[in-house]
Image (spheres, rainbow, N blue to C red):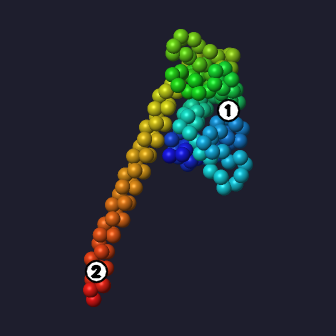
Amino acid sequence: MEGFTSLQAGRFTGCTGNQLRYWDKIALVKPSVQATGGRPGVRRLYSFRDLVALKVVNSLLEGGMSLQRVRRAFEYLRGSAGLEEHLSGVKLVTDGQSIFKICKTDGDIIDALKQGQMTFFIAIDELAGEVDQGVSEFLRDRDQFVRTLRAAEQELRDESEPAKRRRRGA
């Protein structure tokens, strides 16, 4: 699979199509496999890591964070050591005002917005697991559909062979 379409990304992360388009436009979470580049008719294709980032953004917004604060936190996370590092093995904590990064290895708590206190956790690895489960179910369902379709095609071919033979013999 090359990447996940906007429809699939929305299904796996709970984001709307409008959110995906807007977050791409403001460069909050851009599709890394294929961006539209402003060209109509070009599909956005997201990587698995993009889906995790989308799920994190959506969870923070649902937790009461403003889009501006989420954007500032993501800019900090991208700039400090790269967002890739932050999307595995860490927890993000928010109180609706600030976002804190908790490092599992050394226990450090870093305020991505330089203010506020902790009240609830978003475990990025758990969100990644949820996205992975959704993707796995989708792939399993797709593979089952393709197998069923091929079996039905084969049955049709097998059923039509005797009819062809009867026509030839007549």
In the visual, does 14 lie left or right of 114?
left
Helix, strand or loop under label 2 = helix
Residue 95 in view in this figure: no
C-alpha separation, residue under disc 1 versus residue under disc 2: 68 Å
Judging by the rendered image, the residue that carries numbered circle 2 is 165
Q: Of the residues shown, which amino acid type is indicated by label 2?
A: Arg
Mark 1 or 2: the one toward you: 2
Instruction: Name the residue: 51% across, 13% down.
Output: 105
Pointer 1 or 2: first along the chain? 1
Q: Position of residue 25 (x, y in %)?
A: 71, 41
Q: Of the residues shown, which amino acid type is indicated by label 1?
A: Leu
Instruction: Name the residue: 73% across, 48% down.
Output: 38
Judging by the rendered image, the residue that carries numbered circle 1 is 67
Q: Is residue 134 above or below residue 106?
A: below
Quadrant (top left/top right/bottom left/bottom right) for the C terminus: bottom left
**Circle 2: is it few (<14), some (14-19), or many (20+) Cα within 10 Å?**
few
Q: Position of residue 3 (x, y in %)?
A: 55, 44
The one nearer the camera, 150 or 137, is 150
Quadrant in the rendering for residue 156: bottom left
The one nearer the camera, 112 or 42, is 42
* Callout 1 touching callout 2 (CB < 8 Å): no
Quadrant in the rendering for residue 41: bottom right
Instruction: Name the residue: 50% across, 46% down.
Output: 1
Residue 24 in view in this figure: yes
Instruction: Name the residue: 64% across, 16% down.
Output: 111
Q: Position of residue 85 (x, y in %)?
A: 58, 24
